[in-house]
Amino acid sequence: MQKFTVHKGLVAPMDRENVDTDAIIPKQFLKSIRKTGFGQNLFDAWRYLDPGEPGKDPASRKPNPDFVLNQPRYQGASILLARKNFGCGSSREHAPWALDQYGFRCVIAPSFADIFFNNCFKNGLLPIVLGDSQVDRLFNEVAAFPGYQLTVDLERQVVVLPQGDEMAFDVQPFRRYCLLNGFDDIGLTLRHADKIKAFEAERLATKPWLAHTL
């Protein structure tokens, strides 16, 4: 999993409440048995005017010019600004996969659905909860200033605005530790790889028949 320490990026505003996971990555794209390739279908029903299907070449489709991510000023955005209850709906982990693979490193909103919130941390995507008035201010500034960028400092737990103002946010210490070091659940386990190998070697030495057991 990619580490998250300090990230500076262009902000894209998603000015909708209750954006659910089926909007983030529609159900027809969940057929894949791989964990990759979902970024091109992020917000598929909103990004395109024609129906999307797995394997369809995005270059052959009709983009919706009114959708925020298709607007030239937000091309290359890596911070998504959203409204309350972002990521509600089904528990599909594909939603943070799609956001990450599109290029987002962080989502800022007043609130998130619990399962989506937890899945973000497990996949290197930082969800930040800020107050309604703070999020309102960011939406206003993004609209007023093309090319608007924020700096997210996880170590200090602050969002730094272009003029230098800071907005503090809370992250549970263990989650912060995992993101700073790039540890998903497997990475956390592999910290103890030497102990695991030693245990397996000792067990095999004392119980050699295990080597021949299915």
Image (spheres, rainbow, N blue to C red):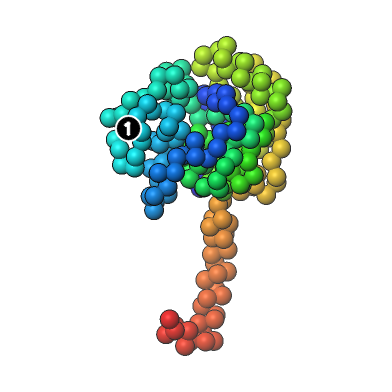
- Looking at the picture, tell me which residue is in the foreground, 152 or 111: 111
Q: Is residue 158 visible?
A: no
Instruction: Work out whether residue 62 can be spotted.
Output: yes
Instruction: Mark 1: give few (<14), some (14-19) or many (20+) Cα within 10 Å.
Output: some
Quadrant assignment for the C terminus:
bottom left
The residue depicted at 45 percent of the width and 40 percent of the height is 26
Q: Is residue 158 left or right of residue 94?
A: right
Q: Residue at x 67, y 49 (%)?
A: 174
Check disc 1 and report the residue beneath it. Answer: 58
Residue 131 percent across, percent down from the top left: 72, 28
Is 47 on the left or on the right of 159, as rendered? left
Residue depicted at x 55% and y 69%: 196
114 to 65, vertically: above or below: below
Q: Nearer the viewer, residue 109 or 9?
A: 109
The amino acid sitting under disc 1 is: Pro
Q: In the image, residue 200 lies at what x, y percent? A: 52, 76
Give how far across and how far down residue 4 sits, in percent: 57, 40
Most foreground residue, 13 or 171: 13
Res 20 → quadrant: top right
User: Does residue 48 lie above or below 1 as drawn?
Assistant: above
In the image, is residue 18 above or below residue 33? above
Count of labels in the image: 1
Q: Position of residue 175 (x, y in %)?
A: 65, 47
The residue shown at (48%, 22%) is 68
Give the quadrant of residue 179: top right
Quadrant of residue 190 in the image?
bottom right
Callout 1: SS: helix
| Left-right relation of 84 to 212 | right
